[in-house]
Image (cartoon, rainbow, N blue to C red):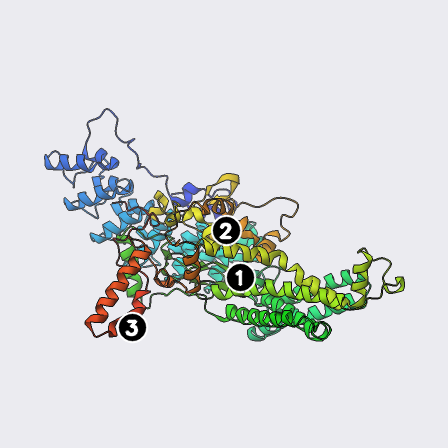
């Protein structure tokens, strides 16, 4: 392997151009995965058969006595080595049954079969070898044990599996590098996060005095730099040449990534924590209350000043509000960073509702008394809107359960691996827990959400199984309430005599005379009505898409990523990469974007990192608004679901998808309203699709409950109702998974 120390050697000149995929993954070895070692015309032997994975030929050779499982070729390599490096699981299993030495050392690097498999991240080969007592702590001639080699492969699930084996997370290679250093050097954000979760030391030093933070600076990955600092990495630690990580960032021209990482962590480039004017609790209160105050200032500005100056000053006031929130209260360096994690947008919703109600009480109720039914409808609608808005904000969206002990976690990992289903769709690295079907890990809330729809900044919460109903009711009543308010506003102006003399109307007004007269008569009401009506531009689209998805028994997440979910007709998890656990190398999709196997489109930043020199390129939208926050605005209004990732493809395929949850329009709506009772499931514990389908499984369970109830005098049915709606447990390996999980190598 090329020594990465050359990258930071002052004599050789610091540069990141020397970083290559081959050097990072250590694939420049003397052995091969193919059959180049043997001539096509040579006699077929057990080594060629192991390379091909031909179990029948291996069996014939061993049973005939022409070969044995312990044979070695001229490079001292066993058949098990060749089967392991080519991921031939049945061949590995048969050779082990025939007495192959599980920890046989061979090849130029004097490595074991598990090290050969680990170098390529073959999860299920590793799992099989460990089941036969392979030793993961054995080091090859370069000093790499299996944990180092799995880290080199950038395969996250094999790394997870090995971390739950008896091996030291901070074990060192011949130059003192730990796995965390290698992951930081390679720019593998998920591997770094996983190693840190398992207790890797962020302040360990190699033989050259370099810490993981130094190696993250070599790669220039701001996300990894931030993660290490958050876990307590020392910013002032120095290497053997007396260089701090910041000094190295200056040398390697990655100071920009360094500054950005520390800014995101609330520090300046020297690691000094930036203070905030208020405590966290008071900051949230201030951010939530600020829109209500500024909306009053904006509406009064439009009322007092002529329209041509009032509009400009109102826009300046709106920008001032955003500036105070982001740059003063949050003390951020940008206007979009972290703002979605605050109650800012929920404050905009509540502030808008307050001033709509103010206009209704002070103007519309008194002047339009003949529209009593409309007023009653508006009052009920606003009450329901406020209540469901509050519930959407405060309800737990459906947090998925996490293991309560290390033993339970290890058992889950072992069970999934033995079933051939340990991958990014069935296990969450961030939560260190099994992922139910239809769940999603939210990076903002930092938890997995059952039947996740999306994270909504307008309700300062995720929308999931437990609060989706309240969210839809909130949006519905919001749209209806705005419509009723506009109607009452129209009735208000229709019931009064508006002065239309030229002296009462601004000569510079660009609207028709009637509208100019209305605006001049009560500018405050017109401004509030215009602001409320503006919200219909996105709330109607949001409501229509939500109702369509409910009718189709789908979520926003599933529509946007439909091709990833095998249980809805996609091919997620059926590729070789899916079987091994997703990797960090991206392959380019159409249009130049990076598609990552087993990773959600919005999670690719965790894998590649936009600031990683020499890493996989990240697709950027170029155009007249590139870099102006258009992506943030699209996400804010909810339109990104139609443009992000493969959303368009998902919308096209949704009508033809093979959706096992689809019960028809009426029953889909009923299942949505009852949070899974129509299907007979609890979404936070739903891990498998029953082979007979949800309806038949529910019918069978109800019948079993009835029989149990009769057997104990009718008590059992009531006591068993909870289990009736439970998800299907971890032990149901025989369940038909409809292509959702990867095909087992066996």
Q: CA–CA distance between discs 3 and 1?
A: 37 Å
Q: Is residue 43 visible?
A: yes
Nearer to the camera, 129 or 19: 129
Q: Which residue is mark 2?
A: 609
State the quadrant of the C terminus: top left
Horizontal side of 68 relative to 698 (left or right) equals left
Q: Nearer the viewer, residue 615 or 539?
A: 539
As drawn, 547 above or below 625: below
Residue at 28% in and 52% down = 691
> Label 3: which residue?
718
As drawn, 231 above or below 153: below
Q: Quadrant of the N terminus?
A: top left
Q: CA distance from mark 2 to mark 3?
A: 52 Å
SS class of the residue under badge 2? Answer: loop
Q: Is residue 540 above or below residue 738?
A: below
| Image position of 5 (left or right of 529) | left
Dot 3 and dot 1 residues touching (CB under 8 Å): no
Q: Earlier in the sequence, mark 2 or mark 3?
A: 2
Identify the residue under disc 1: 456
């Amino acid at each position: 392997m090329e020594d990465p120390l050359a990258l930071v050697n002052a004599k050789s000149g610091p540069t990141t151009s020397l970083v290559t995929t081959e050097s990072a993954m250590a694939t420049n070895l003397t052995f091969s995965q193919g059959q180049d070692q043997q001539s096509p015309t040579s006699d077929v032997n057990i080594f060629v058969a192991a390379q091909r994975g031909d179990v029948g030929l291996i069996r014939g050779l061993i049973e005939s006595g022409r070969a044995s499982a312990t044979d070695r070729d001229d490079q001292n390599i066993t058949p098990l080595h060749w089967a392991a490096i080519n991921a031939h699981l049945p061949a590995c299993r048969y050779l082990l049954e025939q007495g192959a030495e599980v920890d046989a050392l061979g090849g130029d690097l004097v490595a074991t079969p598990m090290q050969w498999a680990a170098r390529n991240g073959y999860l299920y080969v590793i799992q099989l070898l460990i089941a036969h007592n392979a030793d993961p702590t054995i080091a090859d001639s370069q000093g790499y044990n299996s944990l180092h080699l799995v880290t080199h492969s950038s395969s996250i699930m094999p790394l997870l599996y090995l971390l739950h084996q008896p091996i030291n997370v901070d074990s060192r290679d011949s130059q003192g590098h730990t796995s965390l250093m290698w992951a930081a050097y390679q720019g593998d954000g998920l591997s770094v996060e996983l190693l840190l979760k398992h207790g890797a030391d962020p302040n360990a030093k190699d033989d050259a005095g370099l810490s993981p933070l130094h190696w993250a600076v070599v790669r220039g990955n701001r996300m990894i730099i931030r993660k290490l600092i958050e876990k307590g990495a020392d910013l002032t630690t120095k290497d053997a040449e007396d260089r701090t990580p910041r000094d190295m960032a200056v040398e390697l021209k990655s100071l920009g990534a360094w500054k950005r990482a520390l800014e995101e962590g609330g520090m300046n480039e020297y690691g000094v924590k930036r203070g905030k004017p208020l405590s966290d609790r008071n900051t949230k209160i201030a951010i939530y209350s600020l829109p209500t105050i500024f909306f009053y200032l904006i509406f009064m500005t439009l009322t007092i000043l002529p329209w041509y100056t009032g509009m400009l000053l109102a826009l300046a006031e709106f920008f001032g509000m955003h500036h105070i929130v982001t740059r003063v209260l949050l003390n951020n360096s940008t206007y979009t960073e972290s703002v979605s994690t605050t109650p800012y947008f929920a404050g905009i919703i509540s502030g808008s509702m307050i001033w709509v109600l103010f206009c209704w009480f002070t103007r519309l109720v008194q002047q339009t008394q003949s529209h009593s039914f409309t007023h009653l409808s508006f009052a009920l609608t606003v009450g329901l809107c406020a209540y469901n808005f509050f519930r959407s904000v405060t309800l737990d969206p459906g947090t998925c359960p996490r293991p309560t002990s290390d033993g339970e976690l290890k058992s889950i990992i072992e069970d999934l691996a033995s079933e051939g289903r340990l991958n990014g769709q069935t296990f969450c690295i961030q939560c260190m827990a099994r992922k139910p079907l239809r769940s999603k890990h939210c990076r903002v809330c930092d938890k997995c959400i059952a039947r996740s729809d999306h994270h909504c900044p307008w309700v300062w919460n995720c929308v999931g199984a437990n609060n989706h109903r309240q969210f839809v009711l909130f949006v519905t009543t919001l749209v209806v309430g705005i419509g009723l308010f506009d109607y009452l506003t129209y009735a208000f102006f229709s019931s009064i005599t508006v002065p239309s003399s030229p002296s009462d109307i601004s000569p510079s007004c660009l609207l028709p005379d009637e509208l100019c007269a209305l605006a001049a008569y009560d500018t405050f009401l017109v401004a509030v009505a215009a602001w409320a009506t503006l919200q219909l531009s996105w709330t109607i689209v949001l409501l229509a898409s939500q109702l369509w998805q409910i009718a189709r028994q789908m979520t926003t997440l599933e529509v946007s990523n439909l091709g990833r979910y095998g249980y809805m007709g996609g091919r997620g998890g059926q590729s070789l990469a899916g079987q091994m656990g997703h990797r960090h190398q991206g392959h380019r999709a159409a249009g130049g974007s990076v598609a990552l196997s087993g990773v959600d489109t919005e999670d690719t930043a965790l894998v590649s990192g936009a600031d990683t020199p020499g890493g996989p390129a990240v697709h950027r939208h170029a155009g007249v608004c590139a870099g102006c926050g258009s992506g943030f605005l699209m996400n804010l209004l909810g339109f990104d679901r139609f443009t992000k990732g493969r959303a368009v493809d998902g919308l096209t395929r949704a009508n033809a998808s093979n959706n096992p949850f689809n019960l028809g329009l009426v029953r889909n709506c009923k299942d949505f309203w009852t949070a899974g009772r129509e299907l007979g499931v609890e979404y936070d514990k739903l891990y498998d699709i029953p082979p007979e389908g949800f309806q038949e499984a529910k019918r069978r369970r109800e019948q079993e409950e009835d029989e149990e109830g009769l057997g104990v005098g009718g008590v059992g049915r009531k006591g068993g109702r909870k289990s009736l709606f439970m998800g299907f447990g971890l032990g149901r390996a025989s369940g038909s998974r409809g292509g959702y999980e990867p095909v087992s190598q066996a």
